[in-house]
Image (cartoon, grey):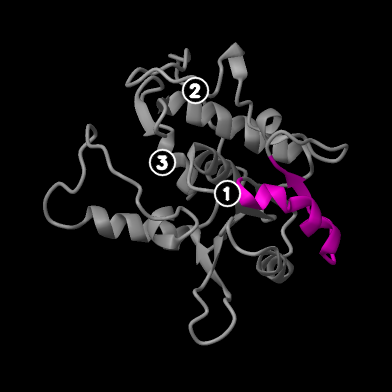
Amino acid sequence: MNLASLVVGHPAAGRALYDGGRWHSWGELRRRAAATASGLAGLGVGPGDRVAIAWPTSVDFVVAYLAVLAAGCVAVPLNPNSPPAELARELEAVTPAALLAGGAAALSAAELGEGLSFSPLIVRPGSGTAKAPAWEELSAATANGRDANAANGDAITDPVTEESALPVVGRDENDLAVLLFTSGTSGAPKAAMLTAGNLGANLEQMLALPGEIVRADDVSLAAVPLFHVFGLN
């Protein structure tokens, strides 16, 4: 059981996500997630390793999350707008093998890396190092010569029309899949463990409600952060 496999069966040219500039296809998501998962493996990050994702709500967050799960790793979504000290505390609590940082978190990533007691691989947009490539390279954001920031209204600009593959590492339903920090209402936020079975059961319960909750042609607005369990699942 691996939640990333849920995106495998959708038509490659079908609309998957709209980011305010253009539609991104299922084929593009699978291709980029596969490239990212492969890139992480090439950096020595494999099944069971923890990968922190400190990224604003965006297509890149979705690509990163799918890639981490597909690789059999444990995703650790973090609030990218948290103060550096709080991000450092959370990183120290989970000691991830890698940190994928975007938005405000990308600006403080170098400082974070220097202050930690361990040395995670840090991947962020536009800034590669000898240890880790820039995010654009890792996720193949400009594959096939396409401008990843192209805007074309409601059109699908991704040229991929064939069924794009996303190799997925098999996981047991009891395997840890996600670590999510609590709100910390009774103390410091703690990393709550969610298994592959937990994530799947949540979706199955929603789909089991009477009536057709969502159809293939529906469009849903993501109005909550994806690093929060409500937005994530």
Amino acid identity at mark 1: Trp
Q: Where is residue 18? Give x, y as percent.
A: 38, 32
Q: How far is the residue under mark 1 from the one under mark 3? A: 22 Å
Amino acid identity at mark 2: Ser
Q: Earlier in the sequence, mark 1 or mark 3?
A: 3
Position of 220 relative to 91 (above/below): above
For residue 233, side relative to residue 133 (left or right): left
What residue is pinned by disc 1?
A: 55
Q: Residue at 18% of width from left, 49% of height from top?
A: 213
Magenta residues, start to end: 103-124
For residue 148, side relative to residue 90 (left or right): left
Q: Of discs 2 and 1, which sits in the foreground? A: 1
Q: Where is residue 199? Give x, y as percent.
A: 43, 58
Q: How far is the residue under mark 2 from the one under mark 1? A: 25 Å
Q: Residues within 10 Å of mark 2 (few under 14, many from 20)?
A: many
Is 133 magenta? The answer is: no
What residue is pinned by disc 3?
A: 6
